[in-house]
Amino acid sequence: MSEDLERKIKVLERKLRLFEEAMHQTTVLRKKYDEARKSLKSMNTQLEQKVVERTQKVEDERQYLQAVINSVENPILVIKEDYSVDLMNSSLYKKIDFSLVKDVNNPKCYEVSYGRSTPCHHDNHPCLLQKVLATKKHEKSVHMYFDKNDEKHYVERSASPLFDKENRCIGIIESANDVTEYLEVQDELREQKSVLDFQAHHDALTGLPNRLLFNDRLNQSIEKAKRNKEGLAVFFIDLDRFKEINDSLGHKSGDIVLQEVSSRITSIIRKEDTVSRLGGDEFTILMTELNRAQDASLLAQKILDVLSEPIKIEKNTLYVSSSIGISLFPQDDTDAQNLLKYADAAMYKAKAEGRNNFQFYSSEMTQMAFEHVAMEASLRQGVDNGEFIVYYQPQIDGESGQFLGMEALVRWNHPTLGMVYPLKFIPLAEEIGLIIALDRFVMKTAMKQIVEWYAKGLSPGVMALNLSMKQLHQKDFMDVVKNMLEETQCKPEWIELEVTESNIMTNPEDTIKLLHQLTDIGIKLAIDDFGTGYSSLSYLSRLPIDKLKIDKSFIQELPFHQEDVAITRAVIALSKSLNLRVIAEGVETKEQKDFLVANGCKSIQGYFYARAMSYDNLEKMLTATS
Ligand code: C2E
Ligand code: MG
Ligand code: MG
């Protein structure tokens, strides 16, 4: 064998060995591959098995959740964040008819609507779902709706946000509860409670507050009165001889009388006052915001009057009178129980005084009240009976002695008291409104009188009349004045109206307007009692006045009292600078007159020349000077 062949055989043998090696390795790899494939296949089968198991588990859990939700009696709803319904229980349909509808205010959002109702249609019903999404908190609301049968229901909705593991809000769970019955029961209970409350605090027969409520209000009012520095009055009213009515006509009639008494008293007290029945024939009144004790006596008199009106029960006409005791806070006491005790004691005093009257706990108060009440009755009667007369006080030029005019001053010629002066009755007449009739009478009498004097060829000058504010503020006042001028043929320039300074300054704006209406028709105006009323100088320059009348209190001690001298001089200077005339009243001595004239105030009114006198005396004076 050639070397060449041998070498070739060796090469071939090496190649064969390499090939066999490669073959061997391929077989090994193949084996490994088969093994790997096998293992992957088995893993896949296992995974598939797991997925199936998981899916089953989720489905089971969902079914379990649905079963749980279904087992709950109340409607439950699970909504996803996109407002799609995820879960809900079937009882929802049976119990409460509901739907998810677009919110009327915000169409991108949905809201649960129950029965026939529009969600979010008014402010006090905010959309619950939106609220939960916004706050991410549990929220509640009560929602009214009508069911298919048009019956009203209330549903209490309760909604909470649902979160995932990353704490992201993924939906809402809402449950609802029909609380109609519960609310109805609550209403009923509340009503029963208020009935019981009323019964506990009121008298069954008359419906008036009872002792308990009265005491409560009295205590509260005392506290309020202390804070506001006001007064109050406690009345104790006892019917006279009520026992006789009960004994003779029976309790039924007695009850009717008590009811009638209760409604009569209620009809005359103010709504802020309290009337109560303590029991039997005893009533009490709490009068609050009392500024003057006289107001208590006015009310007491009104009660006596209203209760003494006959009461008709079937065929019987009964006359019931009452005795009233009054105690005052803070004068008599500041303690509620003591005030009641004192009013009771005063009531016994009224019984002892012969019944059908009222008494204050303090005897001075009773005295004052009687004078006031008697005076009021007598004043009204006096106007009706023409007991008032007009006196005239001359006004004289202190330099020349010439007659300038006069002031009309009213007098009361009382049948038993004799001549009564205005300071005794004008404040009361103002208070009870009688001043209007009185001033109209004075005005008409004085107008007639001055016309008569001019007609007789005398020179009475100007007639000054005092004008009450009440009169000026009457709606028909201007018409009354114009009619009177026309009727009596009195010229407006013969009349001067005096208004007191303090009166003008209480309500200057309105008063200025009214006063202008008077000057527009030619009537002159004077400010009376000047210097006593704290005039504002700015108002003074705007008033359509003609004259200042220096108050007599500054004149009395002239020319010796330094301050009065200074004030009088200042008023005279003021009148000059405002281009007003000036007159002094209450001039009694020559020194006073001389001082005034020397300082530029020539018009004088006062006892130095003459007192106020009757028309015939004044006529004599006029005749002598004309
Ligand atoms: P007045 O308008 O300031 O009247 C002046 C008062 O001073 C009058 O008192 C008069 O008699 C009194 N008097 C006059 N000269 C003297 C004097 O030299 N010395 C003293 N000490 N007093 C003098 P009178 O008549 O008692 O009137 C008092 C007040 O009653 C009047 O004050 C006036 O405000 C009011 N008045 C009088 N009559 C009426 C009226 O008819 N209607 C209205 N609304 N008020 C009237
Ligand atoms: Mg006057
Ligand atoms: Mg005066």
Image (cartoon, rainbow, N blue to C red):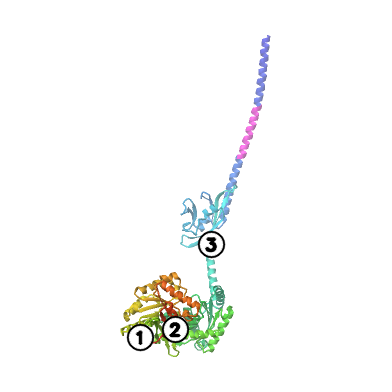
Report whether residue 445 is seen.
yes
Residue 570 lies, with reference to residue 301, above or below; the image says above
- Cα separation, mark 1 vs mark 3, equals 100 Å
Q: Amino acid at mark 2?
A: Lys
In terms of image quadrants, where is residue 477? bottom left
Q: Which residues are magenta?
A: 28-47
- Cα separation, mark 2 vs mark 3, equals 96 Å
Q: Earlier in the sequence, mark 2 or mark 3?
A: 3
Q: Amino acid at mark 3?
A: Val
Rendered location of residue 439, percent (x, y): 40, 81
Mark closer to the observer (1, 3): 1
Q: Is residue 562 magenta?
A: no
| Label 2 SS | helix
**Residue on which disc 1 sits:** 625
Q: Amino acid at mark 1?
A: Thr
**Residue on which disc 3 sits:** 179
Q: Earlier in the sequence, mark 1 or mark 3?
A: 3
The rendered magenta stretch, by its main secondary structure, is classed as: helix
Callout 2 crowding tier (Cα within 10 Å): few <14, some 14–19, many ≥20: few
Q: Which is nearer the eye, 587 or 482?
A: 587
